Image (tube, helix red, strand yellow):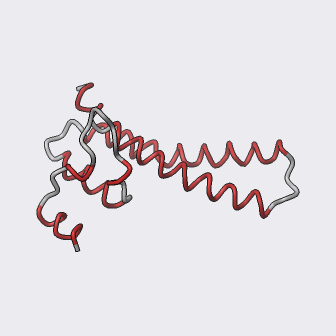
Amino acid sequence: IWLKTREVTPLIAALRGKAETIRRSELELSIRRLANLSDKEKKHIDNLTRAIVNRILRQPVLRLKEIALEDDRDLHVASLCQLFDLESSITDDNHLPAQDIKLPDDLAEQSSS
């Protein structure tokens, strides 16, 4: 079980990384627009946005770990990669990059168009 759930670790990291990049970008924009914030207020907003991202990703990450144990996990992994454009983000020495994941025929056709 542990080994199968470990196979989705690069995907989880890519999803979290993408969310964190968006969070930081939006946070920086907001902080610049709200120039009169104190350092304490900036830190509070940083913590708030971090908590929001973590709450949003918690259930999908837990579900992805469950999906890793299912027979049709490749379909779900490929779908998630496509939905969040994660193919180029997954590079881990112990795992195949996302472009090496075998997509079902109907998804492969959509991906190439």
Q: How many discs appear?
A: 0
Task: Judge from the rendering whether residue 19 lies leftward or rightward of residue 3; answer left or right.
Answer: right
Q: Nearer the viewer, residue 100 or 36?
A: 100
Is 18 left or right of 25, judged from the image as shown? left
Which sits in the foreground, 106 or 67? 106
Residue 11 in the image, given as x and y percentages of width and height? 34, 44
Q: Quadrant of residue 108?
A: bottom left
Outermost residue on the bottom side: it is 113
Coordinates of residue 42 in the picture (x, y in percent): 78, 47
Residue at position x 32%, y 42% in the image: 64
Which residue is pictured at 27% across the width and 57% down the height? 79
In the rendering, at what x and y percent does residue 96 appear?
Answer: 24, 41
The quadrant of the rendering that contains the C terminus is bottom left
Tell me residue 98's x, y (percent).
27, 49
For residue 27, above or below residue 57: below
Compare residues 91 and 105 and report the one nearer the observer: 91
- Above or below residue 85? Residue 64 is above
For residue 9, side relative to residue 1 (left or right):
right
Q: Is residue 66 above or below residue 60?
A: above
Pick whichever, 7 or 68, lies toward us.
Answer: 7
Residue that lies at the very extreme toward the top in this rendered image: 2
At x 24%, y 38%, the residue is 68
Identify the image quadrant of the N terminus.
top left
| Residue that extends furthest to the left in the rendered view of this protein | 105
